[in-house]
Each structure stands twice: as structure tokens, then as C-alpha cells.
């Protein structure tokens, strides 16, 4: 995975002999150093969650948001270099506003994802620009098909539609857990998804090694009239309780199994 | 000596109307102009068409029904008193299921139609699905409003989409966009408001809507000098579009059909 660029990695306008652009890959590495972001497409909406490590004890809680509303019915969760992510979010807001002004209706999530991807990709083409070091998870509602959709835009400009996606430090174990949910066959509700995201984030968090963190959660669903909103604090609190109880149970199960042997 | 005084923001000035033929224009840079050109009595069309420009003094109409819309129009295009085209097609296709009826300057409305057709086809490619009538109407309205000083165009955008079914948007001079239960436009429309108000009910089916459109346009053609020729109708549904015309000697109402 980590191969040396040795001379072909100085600029994003250079291919390596084996057909890779190292600068873009290094940009993805920057994302992998940052807090985990998870998105889940539910039968009645989309839920986005980001693990925000609190780097300083003196930080005011709730500042430096990772999740932003882009249009009334679309939201973006980002991870990686936060200033880079903010730039992409600002562009997404412009695109959404421009679409509404020109065509008179809310931007469909697919088009929003495409426009963000085109923008991010542009920065991988020029020697004088560097790629964005941020991944964006885009949740939105399509008014014409009347379905919610989830996209992820990576630093290379790749965009796919997902049932569930994860980015950041804990993305591999997060993806494993999400696959276990088998969402393409058995979709869950938004409230269920909030619980699952809490469970996965807390599962990945190592008390001894990792810094304390804040969990940002947002959703858009039938219940919110398809408007992108922050998940209410009481819902988060009860979901975190549930998640912690689940994890304790699993630990107990593991201990029991251990004792039987 | 009394005058009615109106502030006109877009002209950066004010107008004081003295009598039928005299008014003052006060401009914001403090120069004052007196004008006594008598344009009272002229229609908007006559004041704003350039000499020799072709006008679709017209009757156009659209009525939605469950599952689609019916659009109807006369076919007369005139330059002053000369009928330049007596069988023109004033119902233009913007996309597979969206049409628009054109009234006003033929050049202006043809160009507007071309632009909207282009933007809609680009959008179809980008989104991968058919545009909504709301989007088409919105695009048309933006063009009409932002260029209102240069244009003389009253259009009715109507069609079918999967979100709303059949819908009709009226975009008169100036660029308002109004979704309506039915719409009429053009110089001939003034003569048939009463007829339509008494005959229209919501919940018509396709055939009833089409019959009403033909009847109303025929009545307008009988009274309006700017409307005449044949009646063209287009029936738009999810399954496709049906174009039809009623020849001038077969009108539901007129010299032949009393």
C-alpha cells in the first residue's frame, strides 16, 4: 500500500510509471488521519455522523462543525483537512443555489454529487494546485423520484452512490460493521441508523489511546419533512446510552466465551 | 392644474401625467423632458413592435387534465394588416412532454423557444431524466424577465411530468410566472374570458378539454382581427403527444358554423 513515489510524486500533473498519481493518493492519506465519518441511507432518509476529536481542552463544544447544510434538503459531512472540506462545501452551496435559480427546483443529490466531484477533480489536474485533502459525504432528497440518496466525494473526484459509506481513521472497521447490517436487503429507519452510528463510533474509540471526542449527527427524513437538520440532543443521548449498553453486552459475551474455554 | 405623479424606479425617474396627451418625465439627474406623443389607444403590441416586424397577434390556450394537458392556438401571423402566414404553428415543443404556446413578436418567441429547448436538453443529459414543466416554465420566465425591456413575448408553458402530471404555467409580458388551472393569452384572449369562465370546470377529461379549447379559440378568432386561420391543438400525455388541426371551414363557431 505504501510505495515510495520517488520522483513521480512531486506534482499532481505527473503520472508514475505504473499509472498512479501519487499526490492524489497522498491526499487520501490526509483524510485517513482524521476523525471517522459515517453515512447511512435508510428506508425513510439519510443519516450522517462524524467523530470530531477534541484536540484541545479549551475548545468550546459545538464549534468547528464537520456537518453543513448545503441546500434545504441536502447536507454534507466532511472529514480530513477541515479548511479544504469547507471550501468544497462552499462550492456545493453555490452550485445548489445556482441550480435553484436557473431551473427553479432543488438540486437533485446526484447532480450535486457530480458537481462537487467535478470541482474536486479539477484540483487534481493542475501542477499549480493541490488536491483537496477532504472527503465529503453528501446526503440529499430527490424531489422528482421522491427518494433519499447518499454519495461520497473523495479527493480524487470519484463519486459513488452508497447504501452506507465511511471515511477517515476508522473507515475499515466501520465498513465491516456496516456490511454486517446488509442494508441493501434489509434497510433500517433513521432512528435505528443513529443508534448504529453511535455504536460503531464508540466501538472504534479506544479510551486509552484516542483523544476525547464530540459526535456530530444529522439527518434528513420524512419526519423532518426532508429538511437537513441536526439530530436532537436527547435522541443522541439516548442512542449513545443504547450504544454503550450494547458494547458492554458484547464485552460480557466475549468474557463468557473466554471462560467457557 | 392637477397631475397624477408616479415614481418609476427602473427609469430612475418620475412621470407626471397632465392629460391624455401630455406628460412630464423627471429624470434623476434633474433634467426634465416634456413629451406630448399621443400613444393612448395603441395596444402594447403596436407601441413596441418595430416597423415591419411580424406579430403573432393571437389566441392561445392550455387546459390541464388528469394525466396531461391540451394546448390550442390559432394560426394567423400578421404584419400590420397583412397576414404573413395563415397556417403557422404557434405550439412549439420544448422537450418530449413539454410544449409552449407563443404570442407577441414571432422573432422573440421563436428565439426564446430555441434557448429553452437547448437548456432543457442539456439538463436532460445531465440529470438523465425528463425535465419537469416547472423547470421549463422557470427557465422561460428567467429569460422573459431578465430581458423584459427588449422582448415582446407572452407564452404559455404546458406539459406533462411524472411529479405533477399535467400542469400549465402562464408567462405574460414582463415575466411573471403563474401556475394556473387553465391559461389563455394573446390578443384574442380578451374576447373569450367570459366564455371560458362560464364553461370551464376543474376535473375535465382529455376530450372535454380539447373540445373546450377548440370552441374558445374559434370564438376568439371570430372577433379578433389578429387571430384566424386554423385551430391547432396538441394533446400531451405520458404516453405521447397527439397533434391535431381543425380547418378554417370546419370551426365549431364562425362564419360557416352559426
Image: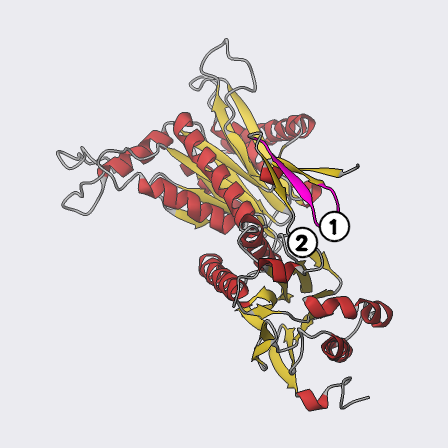
Q: Is residue B48 above or below residue A150?
A: below
Residue B112 visible within the image:
yes
Q: Which residue is mark 1?
A: B20
Give the image quarter of residue B238. Answer: bottom right
Q: Does residue B27 show up magenta in the picture?
A: yes
Relative horizontal placement of residue B241, taking residue A159 as reference (left or right): right
Instruction: State the quadrant of the C terminus of chain B.
Output: bottom right
Q: Quick one: which residue is furthest to the right in this view?
A: B198
Residue B248 place in picture, x, y as percent: 67, 87
Relative horizontal placement of residue A65, taking residue A12 as reference (left or right): right
Q: Does residue A34 show up magenta in the picture?
A: no
Residue B103 place in picture, x, y as percent: 62, 66
Q: Which residues are magenta?
A: B17-28
What is the chain identity of the residue bearing mark 1? B
**Circles 1 and 2 on the same subunit:** yes
Which of the two residues, A190 or B66, is positioned nearer the viewer here? B66
Which of the two residues, A260 or B60, is positioned nearer the viewer here? B60
Q: Which residue is mark 2?
A: B38
Q: Is residue A147 above or below residue B220?
A: above
Q: Which element carries disc 1, helix, strand or loop?
A: loop
Q: Which element carries disc 2, helix, strand or loop?
A: loop
Total marks shown come to 2
- Tag 1–tag 2 contact (CB < 8 Å): yes
Residue A169 visible within the image:
no
C-alpha separation, residue under disc 1 versus residue under disc 2? 7 Å
What is the chain identity of the residue bearing mark 2? B
Amino acid at each position: 500500500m505504501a510505495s515510495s513515489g520517488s520522483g513521480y510524486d512531486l506534482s499532481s500533473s505527473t503520472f508514475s510509471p505504473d499509472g498512479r498519481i501519487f499526490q492524489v493518493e497522498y491526499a487520501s492519506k490526509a483524510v485517513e488521519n482524521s476523525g471517522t465519518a459515517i453515512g447511512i441511507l435508510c428506508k425513510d432518509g439519510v443519516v450522517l455522523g462524524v467523530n470530531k476529536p477534541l484536540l484541545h481542552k479549551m475548545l468550546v463544544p459545538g464549534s468547528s462543525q464537520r456537518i453543513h447544510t448545503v441546500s434545504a434538503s441536502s447536507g454534507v459531512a466532511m472529514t480530513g483537512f477541515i479548511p479544504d472540506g469547507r471550501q468544497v462545501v462552499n462550492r456545493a452551496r453555490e452550485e445548489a443555489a445556482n441550480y435553484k435559480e436557473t431551473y427553479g427546483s432543488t438540486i437533485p443529490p446526484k447532480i450535486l454529487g457530480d458537481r462537487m466531484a467535478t470541482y474536486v477533480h479539477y484540483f487534481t489536474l493542475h501542477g499549480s494546485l493541490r488536491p483537496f485533502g477532504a472527503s465529503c459525504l453528501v446526503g440529499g432528497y430527490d424531489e422528482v423520484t421522491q427518494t433519499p440518496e447518499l454519495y461520497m466525494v473523495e479527493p480524487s473526484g470519484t463519486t459513488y452512490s452508497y447504501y452506507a459509506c465511511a471515511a477517515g481513521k476508522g473507515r475499515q472497521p466501520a465498513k465491516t460493521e456496516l456490511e454486517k447490517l446488509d442494508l441493501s436487503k434489509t434497510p433500517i429507519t433513521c432512528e435505528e441508523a443513529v443508534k448504529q452510528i453511535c455504536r460503531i463510533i464508540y466501538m472504534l474509540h479506544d479510551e486509552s489511546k484516542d483523544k476525547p471526542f464530540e459526535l456530530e449527527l444529522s439527518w434528513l427524513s420524512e419526519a423532518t419533512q426532508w429538511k437537513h437538520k441536526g439530530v436532537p440532543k436527547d435522541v443522541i443521548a439516548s442512542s449513545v446510552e443504547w450504544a454503550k449498553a450494547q458494547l458492554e453486552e458484547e464485552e460480557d459475551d466475549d468474557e463468557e466465551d473466554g471462560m467457557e474455554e | 392644474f392637477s397631475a397624477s405623479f408616479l415614481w418609476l424606479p427602473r427609469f430612475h425617474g418620475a412621470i407626471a401625467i397632465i392629460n391624455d396627451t401630455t406628460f412630464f418625465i423627471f429624470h434623476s439627474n434633474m433634467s426634465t423632458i416634456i413629451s406630448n406623443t399621443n400613444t393612448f389607444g395603441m395596444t402594447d403590441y403596436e407601441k413596441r413592435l418595430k416597423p415591419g416586424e411580424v406579430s403573432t397577434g393571437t389566441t392561445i390556450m392550455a387546459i390541464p387534465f388528469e394525466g396531461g394537458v391540451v394546448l390550442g392556438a390559432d394560426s394567423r401571423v400578421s404584419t400590420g394588416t397583412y397576414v404573413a402566414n395563415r397556417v403557422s404553428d404557434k405550439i412549439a415543443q420544448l422537450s418530449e412532454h413539454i410544449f409552449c404556446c407563443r404570442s407577441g413578436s414571432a422573432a422573440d418567441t421563436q428565439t426564446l423557444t430555441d434557448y429553452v429547448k437547448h437548456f432543457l436538453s442539456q439538463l436532460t443529459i445531465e440529470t438523465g431524466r425528463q425535465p419537469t414543466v416547472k423547470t421549463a416554465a422557470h427557465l422561460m420566465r428567467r429569460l422573459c424577465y431578465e430581458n423584459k425591456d427588449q422582448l415582446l413575448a407572452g407564452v404559455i408553458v404546458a406539459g406533462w411530468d411524472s411529479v405533477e402530471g399535467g400542469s400549465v404555467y402562464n408567462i405574460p409580458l414582463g415575466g411573471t410566472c403563474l401556475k394556473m388551472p387553465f391559461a389563455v393569452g394573446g390578443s384574442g384572449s380578451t374576447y373569450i374570458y367570459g366564455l371560458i369562465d362560464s364553461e370551464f370546470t376543474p376535473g375535465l377529461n382529455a376530450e372535454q378539454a380539447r373540445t373546450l379549447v377548440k370552441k374558445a379559440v374559434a370564438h376568439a378568432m371570430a372577433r379578433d382581427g389578429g387571430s384566424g386561420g386554423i385551430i391547432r391543438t396538441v394533446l400531451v400525455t405520458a404516453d405521447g403527444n397527439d397533434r391535431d388541426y381543425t380547418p378554417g371551414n370546419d370551426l365549431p363557431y364562425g362564419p360557416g358554423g352559426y
